[in-house]
Amino acid sequence: MKKANKNDLLLATTSENDEDVIKPLAWLGEKAVISGDMMLFRHEQDVKFLAYFFRTAEFQTQKKPYITGAKVRRVSKDNLANTSANPMP
């Protein structure tokens, strides 16, 4: 489990379909605990803009080669770093 703070970007790493893999959530609340099936991106940028970017058609196209699995689709942190978005330090 990880702790999310206000203005963190939360990214779902698993889903049953490709569209929802790396689905973003701009966390605007106070502290919260998130599951291991989410990536936490802590940054200094506008969290709403980042969430918007991860929903764009350009990013959706970039992530597809890195999605693995059959029934449960997923993207690893290392694979996400291969996209031009590369939000992970």
Image (cartoon, grey):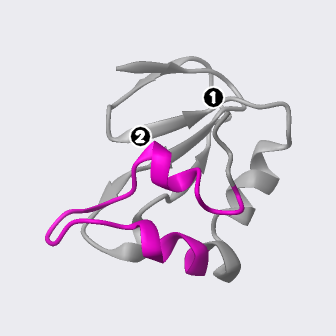
Place of residue 13 in the rendered image (x, y in percent of width and height, measured from the top left) = 39, 51
Give the camera-side residue of 36 and 7.
36
Place of residue 4 in the rendered image (x, y in percent of width and height, measured from the top left) = 55, 23
The amino acid beneath tag 2 is Met
Lateral position of residue 72 relative to residue 33, left or right: left
The amino acid beneath tag 1 is Gly
Give the camera-side residue of 87 and 33.
87
Q: Name the mark on residue 2.
A: none
Lateral position of residue 70 relative to residue 30, left or right: left
Which residue corresponds to mark 2?
38
Give the camera-side residue of 2 and 28.
2
Quick check: 72 above or below 24? below
Identified at 68% across, 33% down, the residue is 89
Looking at marks 1 and 2 on the same chain, the residue that comes earlier in the sequence is marked by 1
Which corner quadrant holds the N terminus? top left
Which residue corresponds to mark 1?
29
Q: Which is in the foreground here, disc 1 or disc 2?
A: 2
Identified at 57% across, 48% down, the residue is 25
- Tell me the crowding category of disc 1: few under 14, some 14 to 19, or many 20 or more residues within 10 angstroms, Cα based: few
Quick check: 52 above or below 18? above
How far apart marks 1 and 2 lie (CA) works out to 17 Å
- Tell me the crowding category of disc 2: few under 14, some 14 to 19, or many 20 or more residues within 10 angstroms, Cα based: many
Place of residue 79 in the rendered image (x, y in percent of width and height, measured from the top left) = 47, 54
Give the camera-side residue of 23 and 68.
68
Identified at 69% across, 79% down, the residue is 58
Q: Which residues are magenta?
A: 60-85
Is 53 magenta? The answer is no
Is 74 magenta? The answer is yes
Lateral position of residue 19 relative to residue 63, left or right: left
